[in-house]
Amino acid sequence: MNVPKTINTYCPKCKVHTEHSVRLAKPGKQRALALGARRHKREKHGYGGQGWPLQKKFAKTTKKQTLKLKCKNCGFTIQKKGIRLRKLTIGGQT
């Protein structure tokens, strides 16, 4: 699916419709000190190997793509939960 580089949509900070630049949201860096990471490290330590079974079969063939819309007036960013897509192209040919 092709998405334009700029979208005219409502900005909750400006309280009017303004031009927004579009980009794809990426996952942040995982925290090494999070409880799940600490627990997993403890389970993997020593004999016994992997603490839980690794997923081999995946039920879903697509991921939900999240768009980040940044207002060009004030710089406020909105995240729009997208739909399931195989491929998302920002600023592609229509």
Image: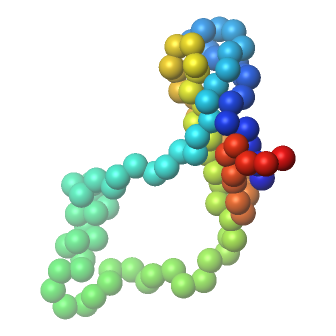
Q: What residue is shown at x 65% (from left), y 54% (from top)? A: 64
* Looking at the image, residue 79 lies above or below residue 24: above
Instruction: Decide which of 5, 54 is in the foreground and name it.
Output: 5
Return the residue found at the far front. Answer: 93
Q: Nearer the viewer, residue 91 or 47?
A: 91
Residue 22 percent coordinates (x, y) = 62, 35
- Compared across the picture, whether 17 is left or right of 67 comes to right
**Residue 74 percent across, percent down from the top left:** 52, 13
Identify which residue is drawn at 28% across, 71% down. Answer: 40
Closer-to-camera residue (51/85): 85
Q: Position of residue 65 (x, y in %)?
A: 64, 51
Horizontal arrangement in the rendering, residue 31 relative to residue 94 (left or right): left
Q: Residue furthest bottom?
A: 47
The quarter holding residue 18 reads top right
* Residue 65 visible, this orientation: yes
Residue that lies at the very extreme toward the top in this rendered image: 15
Residue situated furthest left in the rendering: 46
Q: Is residue 57 above or below residue 83?
A: below
